[in-house]
Amino acid sequence: MIEFGTGGWRAVIGDGFTRENIQRVALAVARRIRSEGVQERGMCIGYDRRFLSREAAIWFSEVIAAEGVRLYFVNLAAPTPQIMFTVKHMGLPYGAAVTASHNPAIYNGIKLFTGGGRDAAEDVTGEIGAQANALSLEEIHTVPFEQALAEGRVQFIDPRDAYLDSIMEKIDMEAIRARRPRVVLDPMYGVSLTGLMTILFTARCDVDVINDRHDAFFGGHLPAPNPETLRDLQASVADHHADVGIATDGDADRLGIIDERGRYVTANEVLVLLYYYLLKYKGWKGAAVRNIATTHMLDRVAAAFGETCYEVPVGFKHISRGMEEHDALIGGESSGGLTVRGHISGKDGLYAAVLLVEMLSVTGKPLSRLLRELSDEFGACSMAEYDWALTPQSREHIHQLVMTDKRLPDFGMDIERVSYMDGCKVYFRQGWIIVRFSGTEPRVRIFAEAPTRAKADELVAAMAAFVGLPFEER
């Protein structure tokens, strides 16, 4: 079955991710476009460096072309945020990127975007998924890709310059030139290298690079920037005496950061730092939007500047919607995605990375010092994040216990309130814990935040034991 989650449709290559299913999705998209009468405006499609990504984009295009929908094909592997930018920049009603983002190498998938470059809303992806599943192979018609190109049904485009220019227009490039920070890049075998190198070289940064070759197996690691996958970057930052190490996930919509001391800076810390920088140093105004599993330190910073932090479900589409509703300044999530008002509606690892380099240049302070100043001013927050693979039986057990019966363990703390907006989140006077099912993988996640890491781990351990999951502190 084709099922769209919080990050699009993802499936194992050769199992769910097959040519036939890709064609089903394409036909469902084409029919939606035609039903809205916007086939002449058309859509764009791009792809990342995963196995079968370009081929999948071609299979998708052959169906779109056969249905009489104009298609713009980004003919080089590109970051997902560049595709979202292209939808916005060209005024297209739809767009798509072939990617499975940070999933293991055996996965691939498709992300869908709507007008303005937004992640497609759940009602859109739900309808497309249902229609795709109902299609028979006899309903699918294709036109050979080369023929579609020759006839003008498909057109190659290269929106990279426009995308990079849009980022540089929003960045204080002169401040970066004045400081000339030393940066180590780790694209994690993905698609961010050309874009980041172009911007950083233009800003006269000294740049070193690791893990830049094309490797569909991502060096044997998850293409997700986390403490386990960024050990090479930590070592390289130390070797080159760099000011910062920057990593992006497989499709470059998320980032991971290593400070000048070789310490992994969490996505929560990056989000809070950048919000604080925009408010204090740039003098910008505006609320923040975070998902339900992201640090409440953002709330403290917002309150200190007379702003509000809004909480939404997991899935960047909800953050984008919240930012539009509240004209928010920044929106982000604990998994490493963020965006800033005036850029695209979706998360962008390249823009966030360059904004962080600007922050280091403008403040003239190393990352470790900025983080210390933040905790001194707003107090300490530590998060514990754990996840487990699920069987259908274990998922049903947890869902029944926590979501249906609404039972909770004894945490040894007074509970202020409980939210079932997205999973089950328990709020305490100092901290919180959430248990929720992943929207992209068969996994359950338990996150907790408390004044100390030991207390956060204690909360996770209590919930894990209650729902029958093995817990080993890390």
Image (cartoon, rainbow, N blue to C red):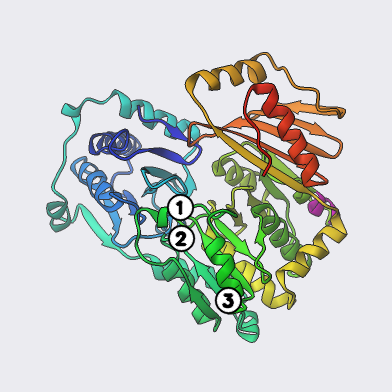
Question: Would residue 301 appear left or right of 251 to someone viewing this image?
Answer: right
Separation of residues labelled 3 and 2 (CA atoms)? 18 Å
What amino acid does circle 3 point to? Answer: Asp
Q: In what element is the residue under mark 2?
A: loop
Q: Earlier in the sequence, mark 1 or mark 2?
A: 2
The residue lying toward the viewer, choosing from 27 and 351, is 351
Q: Main secondary structure of the magenta part?
A: helix
From the image, state whether disc 3 or disc 2 is nearer to you.
3
What amino acid does circle 1 point to? Answer: His
How many neighbours does mark 3 have within 10 angstroms: few (below 14), some (14-19), or many (20 or more)?
A: few
Q: What residue is at 28 percent from the left and 34 percent from the top?
A: 21
Q: Earlier in the sequence, mark 3 or mark 1?
A: 1
Q: In what element is the residue under mark 3?
A: helix
Question: Would residue 300 appear left or right of 96 to someone viewing this image?
Answer: right
Task: Give the residue at mark 1.
Answer: 221
Task: Give the residue at mark 3.
Answer: 239
Task: Give the residue at mark 2.
Answer: 188
- The magenta segment is 300-304
User: Is 283 located above or below residue 336 in the figure?
Assistant: below
